[in-house]
Amino acid sequence: MAVQVMDSSLFTESAPGRLIRIEQPKPDWAFVPNGLPPQWEFPADLWPLLAEAKEALGTLNGIGQTLPNPELLLRPLQNREALASSSIEGTYVTPQQLLLYELDPREPTSGEDRKADWLEVFNYGRALEQGCALLADLPICNGVIREMHKTLMRGVRGRDKTPGEFRQWQVQLGSRGRFIPPPPQEVGRLMDDLEKYIHSDDHRYDPLVRVFLVHYQFEAVHPFADGNGRVGRALLALMVYQWTGHAMPWLYMSAFYERFRDEYVEDLLRVSTVGAWRPWMEFCLRGTIAQALDSIRRCHTFNRLRTEFHKRIESHAPTARSHSIVEGLFASPVVTIASLAARYDIAYHTARADVARLVAAGILAEIKDEYPRSFYAPEVMKIAYGEAESPEHPKDPS
């Protein structure tokens, strides 16, 4: 059987980098991207799309700040991001599985243990939270990126691949090596250059455009032995948060990238092979609009349902805890009696009575065949984790 190698003929003189020969793990070519900024001018005909994307982000940020509890929107957005980003990498977990696991996270006993998948997605959410916390005192930098990677890989498959450290061996994308990132001896320099660009005042591009330039560069360098896609997409969310001056990280792109996975992968590759920055940027800006509008719609629906839930519970002899429990369901719509008892420091039978009130009010329903007994808020789950309204195709048909 012929040895598969990266097709060097795809890389033209317009490629924003160079090919170099490598010998390990097999003789092949690897692509070493040039540093940012690219030799590319943002096209005038994309300015209206950029303006629309920024307007949608501004609206989302404004709505988020009006919420009595920002977790109402933020926690479901981050969980959806964790699920979608992991799905792109082939790890499929349902929202219900993730939420139940969050109530009682445990280490998997083997790679075949279902908890291995749950822990991977759980870790992604923790890496996002950690990144947000670190940015309170630090700029986006390689130190933050490495800490997020360490959290992402904690206790999961691939934890032997030097969590939190840049890779020391060659990797490839695709089982047949469709794209070969730079050799390991180039990674440190490339990531230092990327950090310098992140900290630079590049006024050639709008900050939102710079976000997607950096996302391409990170994925092209592929600095870790594993987890690059997930760290790169988490980093994207943090850059939008910090560089647009949002109150919280509201925008998450993975659901859009998953929906149009072929375009996502192809557009990234075509930047490397032919310097096709415009299609990549158009794709990302359309995704920004789609994801921002989807989050705005979910937020409005959450607020209406929240008001409705509080009205419902009033007719079922609410306790001092009832309204607080209802509020908590929007951030985490799966509960157990034991988890509520622990949260409110009450007896088990008291928590059971609280749950019974919410079931009678049509707010909670029991999850069948789960032990310990578990309950969920179906209407919240539908809003938080249901399919997005189908966005337009990311390519302008004109």
Image (cartoon, helix red, strand yellow):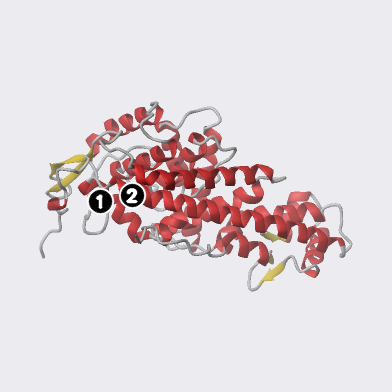
Residue drawn at 47 percent across, 61 percent down: 391
Q: CA distance from mark 2 to mark 1?
A: 8 Å
Above or below residue 191? Residue 230 is below
Q: State the image coordinates of residue 207 (x, y, percent, origin top left).
A: 43, 36
Three-letter amino acid code at the position of disc 1: Arg
Q: Position of residue 304 (x, y in %)?
A: 72, 58
Instruction: Decide: is 319 above or below 248.
Output: below
Which image quarter holds the N terminus?
bottom left
Work out whether 201 lies above or below 227: above
- Taking the image as drawn, is residue 67 in sight? yes
Q: Is residue 397 left or right of residue 108?
A: left
Which of 348/128 is in front?
Answer: 128
Which mark identifies residue 280? Answer: 2
Q: Residue at x 29, y 44 (%)?
A: 220
Element class at badge 1: helix
**Residue displayed at 35% across by 42% down:** 44
Direction from residue 186 to residue 347 in the image, left or right: right
Q: Nearer the viewer, residue 151 or 49?
A: 49
- x, y percent for residue 376: 67, 64
Q: Quadrant of residue 219?
A: top left
* Nearer-N-terminus badge (2/1): 1
Q: Are marks 2 and 1 in contact (CB under 8 Å)?
A: yes
Q: Secondary structure at mark 2?
A: helix
Disc ID at residue 52: none
Q: Quadrant of residue 167?
A: top left
Q: Which residue is mark 1?
A: 270
Residue type, label 2: Trp
Q: Residues within 10 Å of mark 2 (few under 14, many from 20)?
A: many
Q: Residue furthest bottom?
A: 368
